[in-house]
Image: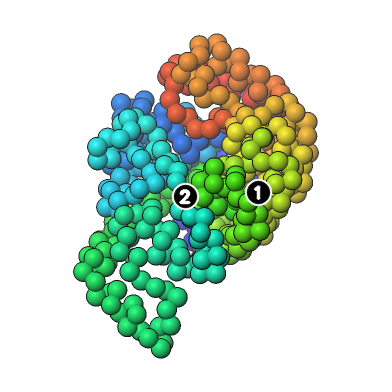
């Protein structure tokens, strides 16, 4: 299905904001430094007296808060719902998700004003490497998915490697299992819930863009090694595997890279000139040696970047953790094509090493909005602007998301960037 443009009543404001983004990516100076609206914006909800539990179970409350935030603070991008699981509580409950803990879930396992928490545990056991590589589809359906979603536990009765043509009864018995039949009924109901949800999310994205705010996040991708470490083996297991099972890890990473590239190539909603976002979870300083980083992380990751570029999109590389020693790798990016977000880095050094290669962003400490004074917020914003804005190729953003803060501090920050960031 091709993307169809919808007439935008605020097209001029939309184009102006999007032009700032493109100018910065091209390493030039726009009229002023753009302020990126974080996808993870909890302040918008807290400011309206809402908890995360409220918005995870009522997407309309989330949408109302987002509208108010955009109207008041006027960032240079907008955002929709889904990044913080807004409205997804009922579906997560119905699927009986084991891997996440979310605000408002039965039993209130985490605080009601908390961002959702990832419960890391291995989905791939040490004696299953060969099974994963040689029978990935069957392994994923009958073992991996049931380990994440309790609703899918009856999938264990199937054997997708069975010779269907010769012996179809091998899985016919599984379909006749009462547990499987109940699962299918629940999945049908869940599919209807998700269909309604994503239709509503797409409609709200259009609404935000019609307010004059681009929502350019059309595509999301993962670094293949991050997928392996986050989901399959866990941080500790993946770290050991690099030494005990390096060939198996590399074989999986190469396989996952092919899958990731194909997914980017076949994405039906990606618009040229918009963003393909890649979170980089496990590439931080000290976690991998340079040798391991280059072989298992960087080279497969660059194939993902190339696939995004081939779609005519902007790779937005969201690094996590400290990234000072990785700057030398980022220098290999194609000039004037990418955005690199930093959580923790020496921004002066990042500007020095990447100033003629990639647009840099991030690094403003969001905790300062909650724990600092108004003057400290202003001073830190000006320091970042003085360091990074000259010559262009810079967009202002938080180290991560906007997780909270004193209202006077948030107001001061947005005003400072808007006024002090003029070229």
Q: Residue visible at 34% across and 65% down?
A: 155
Q: Say above or below: 238 vs 384.
A: below
Left or right of 164: which side holds 77? right
Where residue 122 is drawn, which disc sits there?
A: 2
Is 290 located above or below residue 421 in the figure?
below
Report x, y in % for residue 280: 59, 43
The residue under the point 41% across, 42% down is 119
Q: Is residue 256 visible?
A: yes
Measured in 3D between alpha carbons, the distance from the residue under mark 2 to the one under mark 1, in whole angstroms, is 17 Å
Badge 1 is on which residue?
Answer: 243
Which one is nearer the viewer's eye here, 186 or 337? Answer: 186
**Quadrant of the image occupied by residue 282:** top right
Q: Would residue 54 appear left or right of 315 to someone viewing this image?
A: left
Q: Left or right: 382 with respect to 166? A: right
Q: Residue 22 location, x and y as percent?
A: 65, 44
Give the quarter of the image for residue 386. top right
Query: Which mark sits nearer the N-terminus, 2 or 1?
Result: 2
| In this picture, residue 267 sits left or right of residue 190 | right
Secondary structure under tag 1 reads helix
User: 187 and 288: which one is in front?
Assistant: 288
SS assignment at label 2: loop
Q: Nearer the viewer, residue 238 or 422?
A: 238
Query: Which quadrant of the view contains residue 49?
Result: top left
């Amino acid at each position: 299905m091709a993307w169809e443009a919808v007439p935008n009543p605020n097209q001029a404001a939309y184009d102006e904001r999007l032009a700032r983004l493109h100018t910065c990516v091209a390493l030039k100076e726009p009229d002023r430094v753009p302020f990126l609206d974080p996808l993870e914006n909890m302040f918008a909800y807290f400011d309206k007296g809402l908890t995360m539990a409220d918005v995870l179970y009522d997407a309309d409350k989330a949408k109302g808060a987002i509208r108010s935030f955009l109207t008041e603070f006027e960032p240079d991008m907008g955002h929709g719902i889904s990044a913080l699981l807004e409205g997804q509580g009922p579906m997560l409950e119905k699927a009986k998700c084991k891997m996440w803990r979310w605000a408002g879930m039965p039993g209130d396992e985490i605080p009601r004003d908390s961002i959702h928490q990832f419960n890391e545990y291995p989905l791939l056991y040490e004696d299953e490497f060969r099974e994963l590589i040689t029978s990935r589809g069957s392994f994923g359906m009958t073992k991996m998915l049931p380990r994440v979603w309790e609703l899918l536990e009856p999938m264990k009765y199937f054997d997708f490697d069975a010779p269907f043509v010769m012996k179809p009864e091998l899985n016919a018995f599984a379909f006749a299992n009462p547990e499987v039949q109940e699962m299918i009924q629940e999945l049908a109901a869940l599919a209807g819930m998700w269909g309604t949800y994503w239709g509503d999310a797409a409609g709200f994205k259009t609404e935000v863009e019609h307010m004059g705010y681009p929502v350019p996040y059309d595509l999301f991708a993962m670094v293949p090694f991050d997928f392996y470490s986050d989901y399959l083996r866990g941080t500790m297991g993946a770290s050991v595997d690099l030494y005990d099972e390096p060939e198996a890890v590399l074989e999986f990473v190469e396989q996952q890279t092919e899958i990731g590239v194909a997914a980017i190539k076949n994405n039906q909603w990606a618009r040229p000139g918009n963003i393909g976002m890649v979170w980089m979870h496990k590439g931080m300083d000290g976690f991998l040696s340079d040798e391991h980083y280059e072989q298992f992380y960087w080279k497969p990751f660059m194939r993902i970047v190339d696939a995004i570029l081939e779609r005519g999109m902007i790779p937005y590389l969201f690094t996590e953790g400290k990234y000072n020693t990785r700057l030398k790798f980022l220098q290999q990016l194609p000039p004037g094509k990418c955005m690199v977000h930093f959580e923790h880095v020496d921004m002066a050094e990042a500007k020095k090493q990447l100033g003629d290669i990639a647009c840099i962003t991030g690094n403003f400490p969001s905790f300062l909005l909650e724990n600092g004074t108004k003057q400290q917020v202003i001073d830190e914003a000006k320091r970042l602007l003085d360091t990074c804005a000259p010559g262009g190729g810079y967009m202002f953003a938080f180290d991560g998301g906007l997780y909270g803060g004193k209202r006077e501090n948030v107001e001061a920050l947005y005003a400072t960037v808007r006024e002090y960031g003029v070229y």
